[in-house]
Image (cartoon, grey):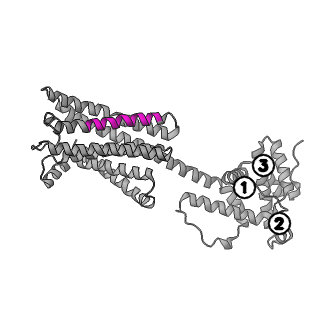
Amino acid sequence: MNGSSYYFPAVAMAVVLALKTPALLRDWRDPLLRSVCALLALAGLVFCFAAPPTIAEVNRVTGVANFSAPLVYVLLSAFSGSCLVLIVNWRGGPPGVTRRLTRRWIAGYGAVSVAIIVLFVLGDAPVERLRDLDTYYANTPFIREMIVLYLLAFTVAGIAMVVMCWSWALQVRGWLRTGLLIIGFGFLSNVPYAAAKFTAVVARWNGGNLDDLSTYVAPLLASAGAQVSAIGFCLPLACQRIGDSWATWSTYRRLGPLWRELRPVADQGERAVRISWWSPAQLQVTQRESDIHDGMLNLHPYFDSRVRARAFDAAVAAGSAPAQAQAEADAVMVTAAVRARVADPEGRAIGSVEAGTTPTPSTDGPRDLVRLSLALRRSSVVAAARTRAATGPESDFPDPAP
């Protein structure tokens, strides 16, 4: 693997971290957000400092041969711990339990990091090795123990991640389950990575030479596993965001028929300031809902319970379920009220109707508004009411079929 194979993932992690930084600054107390940012930062640092060109440069700047070895091992151990902390906070649960597990993982991998540094200081590694330090110094006192320690810590993290992800995946559904299975599969590569490394080291202990397993095969396994795990982490978050955006824009679109129906009676004087078309989807939906409610208030004196009752009976007779029939009846009453309001430009009916004497459509939430809006577009009862309104007086609304 050349330097670019390390630097491209490092740059990608840095870009994602930069995008996450504003949210982190706004909500620093969110443990899940902190865990995500820590994971991104450590992953980028591991890729950056594990690249052979960076290893050589760090050794040159510090003046210590193989100074990069404990640095990379410490970063790798911290990354392993951050993955476990992220899963603990992502899964949630009782705050006390979550904090306790988080502190244990941080303390454990913090101790491993300190031990790696101490063992390197006690050992003797005078010859710089950019790619094969693990096997070259496999028989060197203290350096040997440092290598075994970081491999054991990395393996434990991989196995723990697989167990936690797969056990959690059995309890959830959808994209989260898919993401957890992918993460578990990615961290499962830690096992063959560590196996390749240990095999090469043990071969050195016994006088053999299987260095290629450690120098070439293991890094490929680690890189593939890291990329698969990154997909697993990103997939549920990305799909959830896409799904939320789709649902929001779908609500906005479904409210269109009702919003357009009420435009002729909207009070344009109160709409001097409008949100821009590029505003967030949720804000667009909120604006449309507000317009609809304002239109309903303007129509309130013109609502006729007799029209709604006849339309309800007609919808039930046509085979609609009670909830759907209610939406269709409200839709017919709204269309009739719009016609009545347009026919009364001076608003004489507004001052002659007492509060509480007129019915109100069922618009207690976005779902009721959507049901009412869809009834305006799809209901045959509403279509029949529109046709009769165009050819005769409102009172000619058909009686329900016998």
Whole-Å distance between the Cαs marked 3 and 2?
A: 23 Å
Residue 6 coordinates in the image, percent (x, y): 26, 46
Please state the extent of the stretch shown in magenta in the rendering. Answer: 150-167
Instruction: Give amino acid for label 3.
Output: Gln
In terms of depth relative to the viewer, which is nearer, 78 or 378?
78
- Above or below 266: residue 115: above
Residue beneath label 2, please?
355
- Disc 2 is placed on an element classified as loop
Tell me if I can see residue 271 in this picture.
yes
Residue 290 coordinates in the image, percent (x, y): 66, 63
- Disc 3 is placed on an element classified as helix
Identify the mark nearer the N-term, 3 or 1: 3
Q: Are marks 3 and 2 in contact (CB under 8 Å)?
A: no
Residue beneath label 3, please?
326
- Disc 1 is placed on an element classified as loop
Q: Are marks 2 and 1 in contact (CB under 8 Å)?
A: no
Identify the mark nearer the N-term, 2 or 1: 2
